[in-house]
Amino acid sequence: MTAVPTASSLDQPVRGSGFATTFVAIVAGVLLLTAVTTLWRDPFWVFRAAPPWTHDGAGASRLLDTQMRRIKPLQIANLRPGTLLVGSSVTYRGLDPRDLKPGLPQPAYNAGLSSLMAAELPMLAALARDVGSVRRIVIGLDYYMFTRLPPPPPLRPDLASRLGRAEMRLKLMFNSEAPENLWGGGQRRTEPGLWRGDGFKITPDFDAALTRKIAAAQDITAMAYEPSQLAALDTALGRLRGLDIAVYLSPMSRAQLSLLAEAGRRPEFERWRTDIATVIARHGLTLYDLATGHPFDDFDPDKGSSRFWVDNVHFKPEVGRWVLAQLGLASGAIAPAP
């Protein structure tokens, strides 16, 4: 015989409903607290111009070292720069936006990305167009962008759209890495140097042990030239048509050129220079080939950083000022050569 529920039993709450409500409230509270604290502390440096962990406009950021392909596009959209410096880590260590001459579209932002590959240039061009503020773009090319070097995880194409950037900001607000970075522990550097809000990284000198290690770790066998990558540069320049564009080949140290020669890559390197010049001319632009013939050959990896070089690959801002002078973009106070 089926039991008939009594009035008193119907008045009792369903067992477990209170626990579920409490659990949901706790989770929602934790998420809200994480989001609010992330917005205030801003470990990703994409929500505030001067987060509390920075001092005098600079700070050590592990996240910018490791997640710059997510962070820098958002910084570009926030800052809405008039002048954009594009390139690899050579650019973000060597070209200081503060060295640009007055009168250029402001503000200026260094969009250099670690191990930037040629295939990512069209996305950066699309981002510059979508942001809408960029009037001048300076593109630094190096040989390694166009080789078989294993590429890093590429820039996400959706970051070239407002909707994609809004989605990324939401993800960063609730990022699983946010809690460990909120109170400064995650700001421990993975690479020496301090980031600035304009995308430039202030890099200290390396000792001889580190410069030797960097030189020995380079995978020269993977630096085979890939002419097919030229199509990406062609696409990027097409998207940027109508802007003031300057393109240069980044200076290379004699030590690095020697490594290429020893591995039999020097003919490929010279072919790359010729091919780049052809692409640039097709767009009616001038190529500033600064890869060799510069007056900065003072680096020896067995002696640590020199006056002009951090390591085999990365030149210092003093060389960067010379690069900008060759392009006619340096401050008038900067001498064109040492």
Image (tube, grey):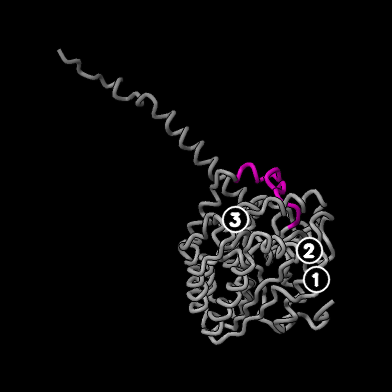
Residue at 68% across, 71% down: 250
**Which kind of residue does numbered mark 2 sit on?**
Trp
Image-quadrant location for residue 295: bottom right
Q: Position of residue 337 (x, y in %)?
A: 82, 79
Camera-side residue: 40 or 209? Answer: 209
Along the polypeptide, which appears first: circle 2 or circle 3?
3
Depth check, mark 1 against mark 3: the one in front is: 3
Camera-side residue: 177 or 191? Answer: 191
Q: Position of residue 177 (x, y in %)?
A: 59, 44
- Position of residue 40 in the picture relative to residue 301 (left or right): left
Q: Please say whether residue 30 is visible from this viewpoint.
A: yes
State the residue position of label 3: 221
**Which kind of residue does numbered mark 3 sit on?**
Thr
Q: Please say whether residue 133 is visible from this viewpoint.
A: no
Quadrant the N terminus occupies? top left
Question: What's drawn in magenta, residue-wise?
Answer: 178-194
Name the element at disc 1. loop
Residue at 47% across, 33% down: 23
Residue at 55% across, 40% down: 30
- Position of residue 195 in the picture relative to residue 77 (left or right): right
Kindly report the distance in space between the C-alpha atoms of the residues bearing marks 2 and 3. Answer: 24 Å
Q: Is residue 90 magenta?
A: no
State the residue position of label 1: 296
Image-quadrant location for residue 13: top left
